[in-house]
Amino acid sequence: MNKRHLFFLLWLCVSHNVFAHAVITDYSLKITPIHANHADKVELRFNSKIELSLSQIFLVSKGDKHQLLSASNGQKQGQIVIAIPPLNTGDYALRFKVFAADGHLTEDVIHFSVTE
């Protein structure tokens, strides 16, 4: 094997780790809305396992108020279940900072509305 082939194989191995961030693949708010004045849950699904002990998920409400939410691992790898407290009607967001099992940080925001 010449040096060029060896370099290419090494690059493939390294590049796999460079792009190993946790990417959200789906979330329950797409099909199941949150209704006013009822505690609920939201499921987030990622393409890799999440280290919950190193992650934070916040509920963001009017006035940029942040409330830390509790979360647990779902039944499938990469699934997180977030406890949502009873909310009034209005616009909200989930802001999350999650660590993939390989240590990469992912930050994102999901906007949603609460209806009657």
Image (spheres, rainbow, N blue to C red):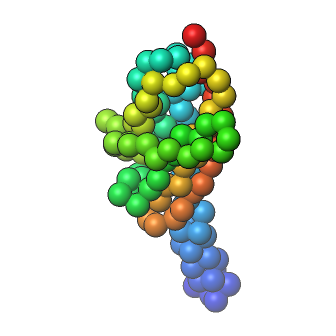
Q: Quadrant of residue 40?
A: top left
Q: Is residue 38 above or below residue 50?
A: above
Q: Is residue 92 above or below residue 99?
A: above
| Farthest-out residue, top | 116
Residue 68 placement, left or right of 33? left
Measured from the top left, where is residue 56 in percent x and y? 47, 53
Q: The N terminus is located in which quarter?
A: bottom right
Residue at 43% over, 30% down = 85
| Farthest-out residue, bottom | 3
Measured from the top left, where is residue 3 in percent x and y? 64, 89
Residue at 51% over, 25% down = 87
Measured from the top left, where is residue 73 in percent x and y? 34, 43
Q: The C terminus is located in which quarter?
A: top right
> Is there any visible trace of residue 105 in the rendered image?
yes
Residue at 61% over, 37% down = 61
> Is there any visible trace of residue 80 in the rendered image?
no
Residue 1 placement, left or right of 100? right
Q: Quadrant of residue 65?
A: top right
Q: Quadrant of residue 25?
A: top right
Measured from the top left, where is residue 100 in percent x and y? 46, 58
Residue at 44% over, 31% down = 84
